Image: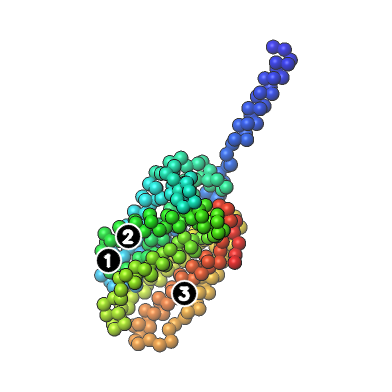
Amino acid sequence: MNLRQWAAVVAMIFASLSSAYAKTPAAVDTGDTAWILTASALVLMMTIPGLGLFYGGLVRMRNVLSVIMHSFVILCTVSLLWAVIGYSLVFGDGSAYLGGTTNSMLANLADVRAGLTIPESTFALFQMTFAIITPALVIGAFVERVRFGWVVAFSTLWTLLVYIPVARWVWGGGWLATQFGTLDFAGGIVVHTTAGIAALVVAMLLGARRGFNKSLLAPHSPALTMVGAGLLWVGWFGFNGGSALAAGAGATGEAAADGAVQRDRAIAPGRPDQTPSLETQVEMSSCRPTSGCVPDRRRRRRGQSERGQRGEHDYW
């Protein structure tokens, strides 16, 4: 083999090495991955036991277990739905209105999610926790008033027909994001707007309770409600901080802002001015701060936005 042939072999080796290097996927950042896994656990905690205890303390004693089971069964059914077809319809390849079936049963997931530094499986897990808590928020509209089977059917169908399409339109690169530039950093539109409208419609269809505005239906356990509100409060550090999809300055800023805003909102409402009895005063003084610190997250998320893969964000 002469010198020219050796030079050709060496050139081919270097060309193959450079080509392989160019095709090497982006490396997974272990810190970002660990934070998103932690944030997923925090958001999951918001549904069970967070929402279960929060709503459970507001109902009559005989219905506490049924309310907690509502949250539990929604967690089970929606997680299965998300794995079977939900993730693919939201984030899979498809049209501007709905994704395809490429990622059905969580198949064909990339080692690294495009534009991020975490595995796509971790991204799918984090998004699943959002899909779980959204129909669970609607429980408050029909608590104590519907059968268990109705809850399972409604939550499954509503997730499939409402949540998944809206998530596709906003987070999955759908028509709202591409044509109108709709921005939603941590679920102000996809989660709370859809759940709020659904709760309003269900409440209107069910009508007023028997004896409404005639007899007092006081919460049976403000303590449970406060415990649930505390778990929701802690869970929001994963809800908002995790939406940065990285363990960077964005996540840290969200966590710090959450603590400050929640503290101010919890203190601001104070005690009610007029109460009919000492018992009701104790109940209301325990439950009223939760009505201040929990719903305020929706207003904050309406002031948040995203760019690209929900990583870079600004504030309105």
Instruction: Count neighbours of disc 1 (C-alpha within 10 A) and say few if under 14, some if 14 to 19, many if 20 or more.
Output: few
Q: Is residue 243 visible?
A: no
Query: Residue placed farthest to the top in the image?
Result: 1
- Looking at the rendered image, the disc whose residue lies closer to the viewer, 3 or 2, is 2
Q: CA distance from mark 3 to mark 2?
A: 29 Å
Q: Is residue 286 visible?
A: yes
Q: Are marks 1 and 2 in contact (CB under 8 Å)?
A: yes
Instruction: Count neighbours of disc 2 (C-alpha within 10 A) and say few if under 14, some if 14 to 19, many if 20 or more.
Output: few
Q: Is residue 89 left or right of residue 9?
A: left
Question: Disc 3 designates what residue?
Answer: 292
Q: CA distance from mark 1 to mark 2?
A: 11 Å
Question: Disc 1 designates what residue?
Answer: 146
Tell me where residue 197 sits by quadrant.
bottom left
Q: In percent of the image, x 50 and y 41: which residue is there?
A: 110
Work out whether mark 3 precedes mark 2 in sequence or the reverse, and give the earlier one.
2
The residue type indicated by label 2 comes to Phe
**Element at badge 3?**
helix
Q: CA distance from mark 3 to mark 1?
A: 28 Å
Q: Are marks 3 and 2 in contact (CB under 8 Å)?
A: no
Percent position of residue 176, x then y: 51, 57
Question: Disc 2 designates what residue?
Answer: 154
**Element at badge 2?**
helix
**Element at badge 1?**
loop
Work out whether mark 1 precedes mark 2 in sequence or the reverse, and give the earlier one.
1
The residue type indicated by label 1 comes to Val
Percent position of residue 85, x then y: 39, 47
Quarter of the C terminus within the rendering = bottom right
Q: In percent of the image, x 26 and y 59: which residue is there?
A: 149
The residue type indicated by label 3 comes to Gly
Instruction: Count neighbours of disc 3 (C-alpha within 10 A) and say few if under 14, some if 14 to 19, many if 20 or more.
Output: some
